[in-house]
Amino acid sequence: MTSRVLISGASIAGPALAYWLHRSGFAVTVVEKAGAPRDGGYPIDVRGTAIEVVRRMGILPQLQDAHVGSRRCTFLNADGSTVAAVDPSAVAGGVEGQDLEVRRGDLAALLHGKVRDDVEFLFDDSIDTMDQSGRGVDVTLHSGQRRTFDLVVGADGMHSPTRELLFGPEEQFHRYLGYCFAIFTMPNTFGLSHELMMWNTPGKAAALYAVGNNDELHAFLTFHQPEPPLGALRNPDAQRDLVAATFAGAGWEVPGMVDAMREADDLFFDTAGQIRLPHWSSGRVGLVGDAASAPSFLTGQGSSLALVGAYMLADALTTNRDHTAAFAAYERGTREFVAMNQALVDNGGAALFPTTARALEQRNAMLRDLVTMPPTTPRPAHSALTLPELAPADRPSPTSYAP
């Protein structure tokens, strides 16, 4: 009998894992609490080793066509005057002409399109309970369905409900990095095209990002907060009030951005943080992507780690018939790569958001130097893992994992 795998989450890591597992003969079900694949979302990066993953998936040409192609990043002083206008790859430590930046929704749509005809999707649903006391994982879904799977994988994001069911509350694994951020869209009344503009004062940043020639901008309001605002995390009104109070009296276009945030129907508010787990699995249940090892937006590596992690987990499950050995091999092959990318926050990852006047002066000096310097060297962490060759697609279907 073919191994049955339930994946929780249909964003990036979930569909990517579903693709590789189906290719290797697994019977895959994906459960997603949203009613459909999520459209829109802010731009994300695909770099380094993740480029090879999407090449092997056959979606690299489509992602190249969808590449945002930002032409410049302009950094501004408190009064709106220009500090420096630099090449985006110089800021991100990327490889011009190789690394990709695409709308999150474009990547999610491509991944879903690769598997929608081969994999069972259960939208508007989620996992309520899991019981591993039998010969598999007995799952009760929120809809009331009860089904048994050989394996379950949580690919449901940084605030993973699957992880909480498996290991307990997020707080014990969450490393708060001292920042909060609000992301939303607003009208492009500034005539911006393929560019980002970022305003800074110590501990605060506001950015407007035009990913094309259209009438919509992605707006970002980021600020330093020594302790996480726990009371606001699940209260949108409190989030708006906190952001508005933090940016009260700010210059440039910030007042208009705050007004737009008040009216936005797509506001996303969260803290910058990482997930640090001692283990990514327990029994027949494992985790992948942000659920296992969120690196934070400060690294720009969340989507790339999700793509690479999905590939490495699929390879381990395909190669090892025992789930314990498979999950161990997945961690053994992937954890160092994850650690290197999580460490980017400690090696200048938050340099764009200085919290003191002195640090802001130093950052501005660095940006001015970038204008005249040659292209930067890519960050080694982005390409630190060499992918194994996944078993051929025509291999025999795996049998169920032994109890």
Image (cartoon, helix red, strand yellow):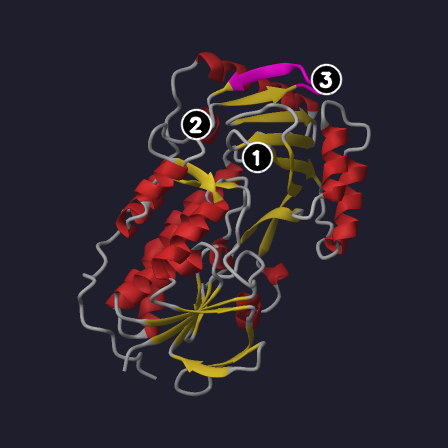
- The percent position of residue 352, horizontal first and vertical second, equals 58, 29
What is the total number of numbered labels drawn onto the structure image?
3
Asked which secondary structure carries label 2, the reply is helix
- Point out the stretch of residues depicted in magenta: 77-85
Dot 2 and dot 1 residues touching (CB under 8 Å)? no
Q: Residues within 10 Å of mark 1 (few under 14, many from 20)?
A: some
Residue at mark 3: 79
Earlier-in-chain disc, 3 versus 1: 3
The type of residue carrying mark 1 is Ala
Q: Which of the two discs, 2 and 1, labels the residue nearer the N terminus? A: 2
Is residue 83 highlighted in magenta?
Answer: yes
Residue for badge 2: 89
Q: Which residue is mark 1?
A: 350
| Vertical side of 132 occupied by 10: above or below | above
Query: Can residue 384 be seen here?
Result: no
Q: Amino acid at mark 2?
A: Ser
Q: Earlier in the sequence, mark 2 or mark 3?
A: 3
Q: Position of residue 103 (x, y in %)?
A: 48, 42
Q: Is residue 390 left or right of residue 188?
A: left
- Residue 14 in the image, given as x and y percentages of width and height: 43, 60
Q: Nearer the viewer, residue 22 or 90?
A: 22
Q: CA distance from mark 3 to mark 1?
A: 22 Å
Which is closer to the viewer, label 2 or label 1? 2
In the image, what residue type sits under mark 3? Answer: Asp
